[in-house]
Image: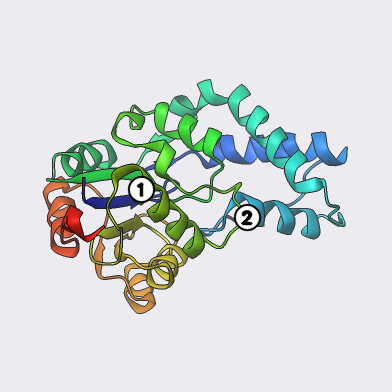
Amino acid sequence: MNRLVLWNIDLTLVDVAIVTRDAYAEAFRVVTGRPLVKLVPPMGRPDSEIVFETLAVNGIVAQDDHLPRFLAALATAFADRRKRLAKEGRAMAGAKDALKAVARLDGVTQTVLTGTIRSNAVHKLQAFGLDRYVDFDLGGYGEEVYPKATLLQVAQGRAKQRLGIPFVPANTVVIGDSTRDVQAARIGGAAMIAVASGRSTAAELRAAGADIVLPDLSNASEVVAAVARLTTPVDRKAG
């Protein structure tokens, strides 16, 4: 395995915004004892950052224990609502076929680079049968309090430790929908396939520095061709 593909989740593979907001509202109530008035829009930010900003815009001064308590409450609230995901959410166009097709590409390992905490990431993909294509142990997640570019490097390190291969810009590619995903790839050390299925336009994604911009994932062959074009397998001896 000598190509690493890291997928963003929300608005790249799935859209479960309704359930996510409801879970955040419940977690906010549990932690603060107050109703949630305003939730900071994700826009590619990790859950850890969203928690701090949401507390601030709702007039809560963050304490040292707020983040771990909030993330634990968020995990519980989301798990309690997981049966709603398939009913009230959706897999993005072509997501399953794209994951399946990329999995057949020579030497590929697929994981996630997401702002979502790990337990919720698993629930999101399981709800639509997408989890079978992903190695969750190698991913980067929202409870790890790092910028997304650093999470990318963390995931590369985990993959190297497991597979014995160095993962560098030449054999690592991120697939995501936001300019923050693009920036993370550029800073962290990976090629970038951007899909204009989220809140960032194709023009914004190109301007941010994406190597390839696709309208969505509906053409699986196009996604595979993009991954193959941007990744060169690294010889195991190089590790």
Image quarter for residue 202? bottom left
The residue nearer to you, when weighing 45 against 133, is 133
Across and down, in percent, residue 90 comes to 40, 35
Which amino acid type corresponds to the residue marked 2 in the rendered image? Val
Q: Is residue 90 above or below residue 153?
A: above
Left or right: where 181 falls relative to 61: left
**Of the numbered discs in the image, which one, if any, rests on residue 145?**
2
Across and down, in percent, residue 150 comes to 50, 62
Which amino acid type corresponds to the residue marked 1 in the rendered image? Ala
Q: Is residue 227 above or below residue 170?
A: above
Whether residue 34 is visible: no
**Of the numbered discs in the image, which one, if any, rests on residue 159?**
1
- Look at 74% across and 42% down and name the residue there: 68
Image quarter for residue 171? bottom left
Q: Are marks 2 and 1 in contact (CB under 8 Å)?
A: no
Left or right: where 54 falls relative to 198: right
